[in-house]
Structures are given as structure tokens and as C-alpha cells.
Image (cartoon, rainbow, N blue to C red):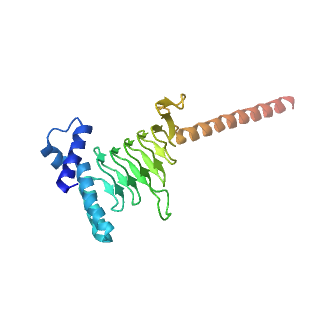
Amino acid sequence: MGVFKRMKEDMDVVFEQDPAARTYFEVFLTYSGLHAVWAHRMAHAFYKRKLFFLARSISQISRFFTGIEIHPGAKIGNRLFIDHGMGVVIGETCEIGDNVTIFQGVTLGGTGKEKGKRHPTVEDNALIASGAKVLGSITIGKNAKVGAGSVVLKDVPDNSTVVGIPGKVVVQNGEKVRRDLDHHKIPDPIDDRCSKLQKEIDELRKEIQRLKEGEQNVDNHL
């Protein structure tokens, strides 16, 4: 596919995904997700030729102007749509298939300093919602959806929806997997710890009160 034809295809994706898009001129000049993808293609071409410094420089310039950081080593398929995009991070060994949608604040990252394949693989037609963190050498299956704010550390099967911290499959092949999950009731470790401390304080107060009452009884007998 020619360069201009592929750019036209990229802009067509924007019109399919974003109802706010009005004209090709507007999309061409103002959509940062589009600019980040185009810059990545240039950077990746240099990266494959082992011109690592030049590739990295292009990716960092793109990051400065778009707020989207894509490592030049990442492999990205056709028709990737990054909506808004600010804060998106895509790691070096990521592999992204075709027709994938990524929203702002998403991280496709690693879990440490391990070598080799250490970033996620996102297969065709997947959607990763705002603020989701997908970490490690895991696979997000075809047609899968990752809910906003989720932290995913394990493989996600095809045709599944994952939500929560850590991410759990709640829908697979159109059927609910868990019926007891309330998305608004996300665990709060700080609140849990405070509740435990308050419970301990209440128990200590009761113990002190019992000791005082015991001393008073002894004094009364004397």
C-alpha cells in the first residue's frame, strides 16, 4: 500500500470512530493520535535499519508534540485509532494488530527489567479504554475489551471484556462470567487499612475501660 493511500486509510478510521471529526483538513492538522502513528512509522523504519538514535529522536519529538510515547521498536498493524491520546505509552516489544482502538492514559508496559518480549501483544479489533494498564508479556485476544482504569496482568481470551484491579473477565463470548461485580465498588486499600486501625483502637479502648473498672472494684473492696 502506498504512503498516501495508507494515510488516507488512517484518516478514514478517525471518521469511523470519532463523531466529532468534520473534515479531512481538520483531521490531518489537529488529531494527535494520527500524528503519533505517522511519526512511529518513520521511527520504526529507522529502528529496523538499526539507526536507533535517529529512531528514538523521532519518537521523543513526537512525544513532545502529541503527549503519546510509542517506542520505535513497537510493531503496529493497520488502522490503529488512538483517541485523544494524552499519556498513552506503548513499549518496545509491544505488538498491536489491525483495527485496534486505544484511549487516553493507556499504558502497554512491562513489569520489570526482564529482557526479550516483555510488553503486551494486542490482537485484531481489541479496544483498551481510558487509563487502563496492560503490563507484561501477555496477550489481549481478538475482539477483547479492557475497561477504563483496569490493571491487566494476565492473558485476556478472545471476545472477552475485562474490568477491575486486577483485571478479571466479566463477559466472554457474549455471556456474563461474574454476576457479583459492581464496577463502582473498587477496593480502596487505604480505606481498608484505616478501618482495621479504627477497629484495633476501639478494641484497645474497651480493654482500657475493663482495666479501669477492675481497678475501681479492687479499690472498693479495700
- Identify the residue at image location x=39%, y=54%: 95
Quarter of the image for residue 14 reads top left
- Identify the residue at image location x=86%, y=29%: 221
- Identify the residue at image location x=19%, y=51%: 5
Image location (x, y in percent) of residue 69: 32, 56
Quarter of the image for residue 76 reads bottom left
Quarter of the image for residue 161 reads top left
Q: Nearer the viewer, residue 170 or 100?
A: 100
Image location (x, y in percent) of residue 33: 26, 49
- Identify the residue at image location x=47%, y=49%: 139
Image location (x, y in percent) of residue 55: 29, 66
Quadrant location of the C terminus in the rendered image: top right
Q: Nearer the viewer, residue 122 or 189?
A: 122
Image location (x, y in percent) of residue 208: 72, 36
Vertical placement of 138 versus 12: above or below? below
- Is residue 29 found left or right of 69 in the rendered image? left
- Is residue 46 found left or right of 110 in the rendered image? left
